[in-house]
Image: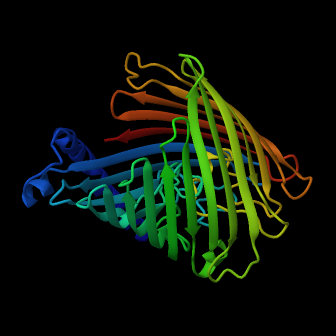
Amino acid sequence: MGFVMIQTKWVSFLATIPLIAGLSIASSTTSFAQESYSEALMGGKFLVNVRVRYEFVDQDGISEDAHAKTARARLGYETGSFYGFSALAEIDGTMHFGGEEFNSKDNGKTHYPVVADPDSFRLNRANLKYTGIPDTTLKAGRQRIILDDARFVGNVGWRQNEQTFDSVRMTNTSIDGIKANYAYIWRVNGILGSEAVLGDWDSDSHLFDVTYSGFKYANITGFGHWLDFEDAKEGSSLATYGVRLNGKAAITDDVMALYAGTYAYQEENAENSADISNSFYSVMGGISWNGFTGKVGYDVFEGDGTDAFQTPLATGHKFQGFADVFLTTPADGLEDAYISLSYKSKPFSIFKKGMTGTIAYHEFDAEDSSVDMGSEFDAVIAIPLYDYFKVVGKYAAYDGDGFAADRQKFMLGLNFSL
């Protein structure tokens, strides 16, 4: 009965998309600088994002291959500004179509590999923003938070249900070259959606990040994150302190050097009873030339055989391989040596934003032992079509070398956004 209700909601929900999309395009030229309450309310913009995707997974040790066919629609509205105040509300729904031939981590189908895109229908974002204080933005309510490169805090945007936060956040740029962020989070709304046991969880967490961009060749970010979760997530209550440097410098008119480095230290926090003392460090160097970018890097998560450096709020899919084997760091820690090559074409024909593609190779090893944790080859291509559509394809092949199950993944999706 519940599934029938969800399906009925979706029929009504998806039927509104053409109307909202048309209204959104028509209102896209309306100024946000409104003079009255009614103008602010009616002079905002519609938010539309629809993604249809097929994901295939072949994993050793699991009897069936996963064939996940899912659709995600996200519809919302952001008002104009009225005396510095504006509001945003957005609903989000994900559903599978065809057979449910995958383990969504909420449907009990463990004879299939995991594709963590369960059916869900929920309020994705709802917040009030205030910009009336010079050089300061205040935002309260359910919101998307992506800090720096999303290594420690992100929205996990690759999954159909994104991660959002019930929080109060302040951003200040009153000092030249300095951007300071503070956020208090009282609830995390995770990627498993509204119906899962751990789809969301309570929080009493604080995030503080400061970035200095006054140097010519580098930005420096210092941060402290104090995570405090309850119940089943209590083991992820961690305090993390760190610094990140990233920048670029011209070598010639056509050649650019790229570089980044991060160091962070982590210990237990709040009611976490573990005795944790682990570090993370990462270095990357690269060269960019005529649309091509080559990078080499080395990431290290320390572990002691019992606990390891963890990033429970990160967009992990972005870093240690698209096969998602290492979203949780093994107890022996992890060393990831990688190389990648990307290319972005110039705009042409219907490809007004140019096509992008990347291939990458990872070698994984334990940090606290001599265990070989396997290797992985990844590839991704993104093809923007006209102004609103984009096709994205991904491939991942992980060879566990006896540490974890071998697996292959293929993902193909069509995105529409305004």
391 vs 363, left or right, is: left
Q: Is residue 329 left or right of residue 50?
A: right
Image: 371 above or below 252: below
Q: Is residue 369 visible?
A: yes
Residue 177 position, x and y percent, is: 43, 47
The quarter of the image holding the N terminus is bottom left
Q: Residue at x 37, y 53 (%)?
A: 173
Residue 372 image point, x, y percent: 88, 49
**How many marks are shown on the rendered structure?**
0
Q: Is residue 320 left or right of residue 383?
A: right
Q: Is residue 123 visible?
A: no
What residue is drawn where x is 43% and y is 45%?
51
390, 309: nearer the viewer: 309
Location of residue 266 in the rendering, given as x and y in whole percent from the top left corner? 69, 66
Residue shown at 55% from the left, 74% from the top: 197
Q: Position of residue 262 (x, y in %)?
A: 66, 50
Q: Residue, x 81% and y 53% (percent of image)?
A: 404
The C terminus - image quarter:
top left
From the viewer's perspective, tell me whether residue 17 is left or right of residue 197.
left
